[in-house]
């Protein structure tokens, strides 16, 4: 009986496979179904109540219909919609949690994804929903990383980063391991330290992006120092090629890689659209106005980079706290970025 059922299921799956238009050839690794809410009566993204499945968010809408689309890559370039089908919530539920980070945003939501999409079209599929108009679907972290990569890549430490930086880094690490460049996260959040006399003196950069949850540092597996990989990056072409390949993956995802800049800080990746590598005095003042005088509630600056997962910001600090001691040193210097490079 069980055997007969298995055969039936296999036959059914094979038929379903054959029905897919351009995906049927099996030549397209990205040609996979995605299920997501088609929420005719779903709240706007900034009013959404996100549910948590372990550490992964998903949202629930009043509408009980879900949309399934098949996404394909055309000659490695932009991702395209292959087919659309409405599925019931019951069917959708079965696979929905397979794609917890596949969020969508449609024009009616005035969602922030549209801005992200403009900056990084390769990570999104565009489609037209008959009810909601033009929508974008984030593809960056379609699959969960394996437990080996989760552990080896030390991805747990990403909790302090902005959700999009978190997603980008998970995907960077996943793709790097796949490309046989195992890396791990070494540093995410480091608190803001005001520079000596910052209100009167002039600095190239008044802070660093780690202090606002917008930067991560990684290293190659097997290295415990920065000096050795940096030395080999400068002297061994094959070793340099590995890091450059990592930089290329990062660029494709939308990260800024400091290895591309004068500083050659190959370990450092950051994302902060609309802002350059240096944090100007006016920007710092804006961050501190949000995050408190010492910059401790740094997540509050994320209103500047809205994201579907950021729905509730922590309360503002009561701000009796004295700012940390001012520092002269520059160990947290951001990458050198020419102003011309700023988006
Ligand atoms: Zn860094």
Image (spheres, rainbow, N blue to C red):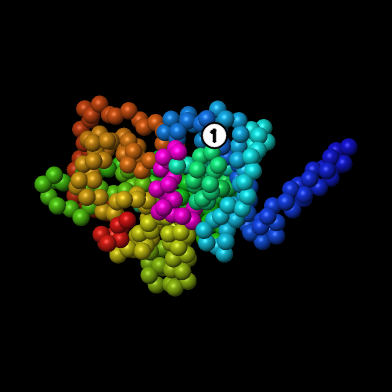
- Relative horizontal placement of residue 38, taking residue 277 as reference (left or right): right
Find disc 1 in the rendering and name its residue. 39
- Magenta stretch contains residue 46: no
Q: Is residue 263 visible?
A: no
Percent of width and height locating residue 161: 40, 43
The structure residue drawn at horizontal position 43% and vertical position 30%, both measured from the top left corner, is: 47
Residue furthest to the front: 130
Image position of 57 with respect to 224: above or below: above
Residue 100 placement (x, y as % from top left) = 55, 40
Q: Residues within 10 Å of mark 1 (few under 14, many from 20)?
A: some
The quadrant holding residue 162 is top left
Residue 210: in sight, yes or no? yes
Q: How many marks?
A: 1
For residue 294, side relative to residue 99 (left or right): left
- The residue that appears at 25% across and 59% down in the rendered structure is 339
- Quadrant (top left, top right, bottom left, bottom right) of the N terminus: top right
**Up-down: is 245 above or below 155?**
below
Based on the displayed image, in which of its 4 quarters is residue 163 positioned? top left
Which element is circle 1 on?
loop
* Residue farthest along the left direction in this orientation: 200
Give, as a single range, the part of the protein colored magenta. Answer: 108-123
Residue 129, given in percent of the width and then of the height, sits at 54, 43
| Magenta stretch: dominant secondary structure | helix
Q: Which quarter of the rendering shows the C terminus?
A: bottom left
Residue at (57% x, 30% y) in the render: 63
Q: Position of residue 289 (x, y in %)?
A: 23, 36
From the viewer's perspective, is 36 left or right of 263? right
Q: Residue at x 84, y 45 (%)?
A: 7
Whether 16 is drawn above or below 50: the answer is below
In the image, taking residue 7 as reference, residue 109 lies left or right, namely: left
- In front of the other: 4 or 149: 4
> Compared with residue 145, is residue 51 higher up or lower down, i.e. above or below?
above
């Amino acid at each position: 009986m069980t055997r007969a059922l298995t055969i039936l299921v296999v036959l059914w799956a094979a038929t379903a496979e054959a029905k897919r238009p351009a995906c049927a050839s099996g030549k397209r690794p990205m040609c996979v179904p995605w299920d997501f809410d088609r929420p005719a009566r779903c709240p706007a993204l900034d009013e959404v109540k996100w549910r948590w499945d372990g550490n992964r968010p998903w949202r629930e809408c009043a509408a009980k219909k879900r949309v399934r689309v098949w996404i394909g890559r055309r000659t490695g370039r932009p991702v395209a919609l292959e087919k659309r089908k409405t599925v019931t919530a019951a069917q959708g539920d079965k696979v929905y949690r397979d794609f917890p980070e596949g969020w969508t945003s449609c024009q009616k939501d005035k969602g922030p994804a549209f801005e992200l999409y403009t900056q990084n079209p390769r990570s999104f599929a565009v489609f037209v929903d008959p009810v909601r108009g033009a929508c974008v679907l984030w593809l960056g972290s379609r699959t969960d990383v394996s437990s080996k990569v989760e552990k080896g890549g030390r991805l747990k430490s990403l909790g302090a980063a902005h959700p999009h930086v978190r997603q980008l880094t998970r995907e960077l690490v996943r793709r790097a391991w796949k490309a046989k460049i195992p890396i791990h996260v070494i540093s995410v959040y480091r608190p803001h330290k005001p520079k000596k006399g910052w209100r009167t003196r002039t600095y190239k950069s008044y802070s660093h992006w780690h202090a606002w949850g917008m930067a991560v540092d990684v290293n190659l597996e097997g290295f415990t120092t920065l000096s050795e990989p940096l030395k080999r990056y400068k002297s061994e072409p094959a070793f340099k090629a590995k890091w450059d390949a990592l930089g290329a993956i990062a660029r494709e995802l939308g990260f800024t890689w400091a290895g591309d800049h004068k500083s050659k800080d190959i370990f450092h990746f950051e994302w902060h659209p609309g802002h350059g590598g240096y944090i100007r005095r006016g920007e710092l003042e804006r961050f501190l106005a949000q995050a408190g005088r010492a910059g401790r509630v740094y997540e509050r600056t994320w209103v500047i980079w809205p994201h579907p997962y950021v729905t509730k910001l922590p309360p503002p600090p009561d701000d009796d706290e004295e700012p940390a001691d001012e520092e002269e040193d520059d160990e947290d210097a951001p990458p050198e970025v020419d102003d011309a490079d700023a988006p």
